[in-house]
Image: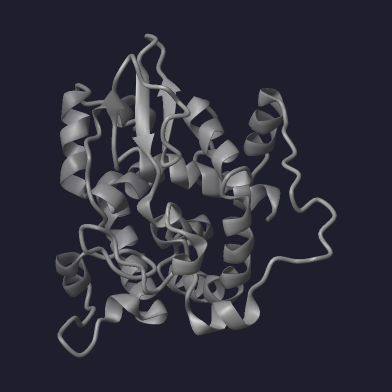
Amino acid sequence: MSKKSILTLCMFSAFATSTWAQVYDNDVDETTDEDEITVIDDEGREEVIEFPEAMTFDLDSLLNLYMAKTYLDNPDDCNMQNVNPTYSKEDYVDRLSRIPSVMEMAYNDVVQKFIDRYSGRLRHSISYMLGASNFYMPIFEEALEMYQLPLELKYLPIIESALNPLAVSRVGATGLWQFMLTTGKQYGLQVNSLVDERRDPVKASYAAARYLSDLYKIFGDWNLVIAAYNCGPANINKAIHRANGEKDYWQIYPYLSITSAP
């Protein structure tokens, strides 16, 4: 994965995951649960963040599609297959600052936690998803370009579904873009006893691009758009209100509550 894609992916994971769970507990041990990470805010409080559900499944259940079983495999000729290079904070800040993007590429403890998570424990899962991205990224890019959206948003389905079009969350969000039933129908996806177009990579991608475009018209900030896609515009507005009108994502971050997919 390129520097740009892995860092962008980690940024999205920080944005999206913050809307899944936030629990303050001074006795939390960072190593007690592999499906959680713990960050410490400026006041010394520990915050436990659940990892996106799609990224906690076993690999076999994640990529059980025929094409994945047929075409995707760990490379045998990779000289650094099990090596996880680490870099200094200054290096990460520098690399993020040099990414040509209209979206903010902030660096903080939350972002670093997810960089470590993706490049460490989820390293082999990422290798499979890099192969799956060859199938899906052209679809995502075409849909995003149609609505003139930043192409960095193509990494959002990796966080939402780990590029599994059959993924279903515990609250019923379905498909690559993890649409809830109501939102999916609102954006033209047909769902009945015979068909569920939330699982259609092409139709769901265009519906997601349209939804992201509508969210940007509301918030005018891509950080808030990504968060709103995950937890809904109403929850973002509530967080802004609790933060005394602050509209910077990292300022409202502590006020985001447990939520579901779009």
Q: Quadrant of the C terminus?
A: bottom left
* Residue at figure coordinates x 55%, y 41% from the top left: 117
Percent position of residue 222, x then y: 40, 46
Q: Quadrant of residue 247?
A: top left
The reply, left or right, for residue 96 in relation to residue 170 is right
> Considering depth in this image, is 169 or 4 the residue closer to the camera?
169
Rendering coords of residue 50 (x, y %): 36, 39
Q: Is residue 151 visible?
A: yes
Which residue sits at x=39%, y=10%?
A: 44
Image position, residue 47 (x, y; %): 35, 24
**Viewer-proximal residue among 65 and 103:** 65
**Extreme-bottom residue of the structure:** 194
Residue 256 horizontal/vertical position (percent): 25, 34
Is any part of residue 106 visible from this angle? no
Q: Residue furthest top?
A: 43
Q: Is residue 227 above or below residue 199?
A: above
Q: Quadrant of the N terminus?
A: bottom right
Position of 43 compared to 136: left or right?
left
Q: Residue at x 30, y 53 (%)?
A: 229
Up/down of 222 relative to 191, above or below: above
As drawn, is 110 to the left or to the right of 118? left
Residue located at (36% from left, 21% from top)? 28
Q: Residue furthest front?
A: 32
